[in-house]
Image (spheres, rainbow, N blue to C red):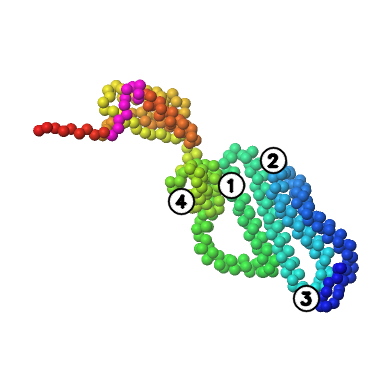
Amino acid sequence: MFDYIINSKTINIFNYNISGLYLLIVFGFLLVLFFLRKYISIVLSKIFFTYLKKFSKDVPVDEFVLLIKKPFEIAFSLLLIFVFYQVLKDPLIVYYRGFENVFSILVQIYKGLLLINLCLIILRLVEFFAIVVKVRYLEESENINESSLIPFFKELIKVLVVIVFFFTFLGVVFQLNVGAIITGLGIGGLAFALAGKETLENLLASVTIFLDKPFVIGDAIKVEGIEGNVERIGFRSTRIRTFDKSLVSMPNKKMIDDTLENLTNRTLRRVRFTVGLSYGQDVNQWKEVVVRVKELLKNNLMLDGNHQVFIDEFGDYSVMLLVVYFVKTADWPIYMETKQSINFEIYHILSECGCELEYPTQKVIISKN
C-alpha cells in the first residue's frame, strides 16, 4: 500500500530503512503537535517572558503573549515542517530523481519564510519594549508629554529592522551580492533623493518637531486655520483631530514652516467684546454700569484680575462699552462656561441699571419748507 509506480516500475519507499509504522507514528505525532501549536506557542511565549521579566515588571504577561504568540505559532509550524522534511528527505531524493531543483527551490522558500518570521518576531519585540519604556517613562518622568518620542523612535527602529532583513533576504534566498546592490543604491542615491525630496523634508521636519517640541501629542494647536488636538506625530505627517471631530493629516514641513499656535500652552484665554448702550440713557447710568461690571470681574475667581471696562467710543448708533478680561484656563469647555456666566451677569447689570442695548437704527427727519 506504500508502493509508488515510477517509470512503470514498482518501488517500495520503505526499502530505505524506514518502516511504515515508524513513519505513521512520526506523522501522527507531528499532526497532533500541529493542531496544538496555538497552545504550545502560548506556553513558549510565557517561558520566554520569564527571561524578560526583570526588564518588564510593570507590563503584564498577557500583553506580551498577545504580541508574540502568533509569530511563535508560525515558527513552531515551520519547525514541524523541518522535522517532517528531515524524516522523508533521503527517500524522497532517492526515488524522485530529476526533481532536485524543485527540492532546492523549496528549501530556499523555507529559508525565506524563516527570515520573514524572524523579522516579525523582532518587530513584535520592538513593540513590546516600546510599551515597557513608555510605562516606565510615565512613572519616572515628570514631563509626561515627552513620551511622544517613544512611538517615533519605535517606528524608526522598525523601519531599520525591515531594511536589514530585506537585504538579508536578498542575500540568503536569492543568492544576490548584497554589497553590489548597496553600492548600486549609492550610485543612484542622488536620483532617489531628488525623487523623494518632499518625503525627506517631512522626515527631517518630524525630527525637528521632536527636538524643538513646539507641540506634543494631546496638545490643542492652530495651524493654517485648522484647530484641534494632536493625535499622532508620524514620519511624514501629523494627525490633528479637529474640534468638530474631523481627522486632518498635515505634512510635518508645514507644521514647522507655517505659524503655529499652541493653544494648550496658553495660561490665560483673553475675552474682548463691546456692548452698545442707548444714547437715550443718563450718563450716571453708564458710570454705574462700568463700576458694577468692574466689580463683577474683580470678584470672579476664574479671572486673572487684569481686566478693563471703559466707555470706549461714541458709535454711529450707540455708546460702546468695552469689556476685556482673561480666563485662567486653557480648557475650552471651562472657558466657555465662564464666559457665558459673565455674559448673563452683565445682562442683569444692564437691566438693573436701566440701560438698554441699542440696535442699528436710523431716524428720518422730514422738514417742511
Callout 4: few (<14), some (14-19), or many (20+) C-alpha neighbours within 10 Å? few
- Please tell me which residue is depicted at 71% across the width and 57% down the height of the picture: 118
> Nearer the viewer's eye, disc 4 or disc 2?
2
Q: Quadrant of residue 326?
A: top left
Q: Are marks 1 and 4 in contact (CB under 8 Å)?
A: no
Give the magenta-colored segment's residue range: 350-360
Question: Circle 1 is placed at which residue position?
Answer: 149
Label drawn at residue 98: 3
> Nearer the viewer's eye, disc 2 or disc 1?
2
Majority SS type along the magenta span: loop
Q: Name the residue type under label 4.
A: Asp
Cα distance in 3D space between marks 1 and 4: 21 Å
Cα distance in 3D space between marks 2 and 1: 20 Å
> How far across and down, in percent of the image, does residue 263 sit?
47, 40
User: Can you say whether 138 is above or below 257 in the image?
Assistant: above
Q: Name the residue type under label 2.
A: Asp
Q: Name the residue type under label 3.
A: Gly
First reached walking from the N terminus: tag 1 or tag 3? 3
Determine if the magenta segment contains residue 359.
Answer: yes
First reached walking from the N terminus: tag 2 or tag 1? 2
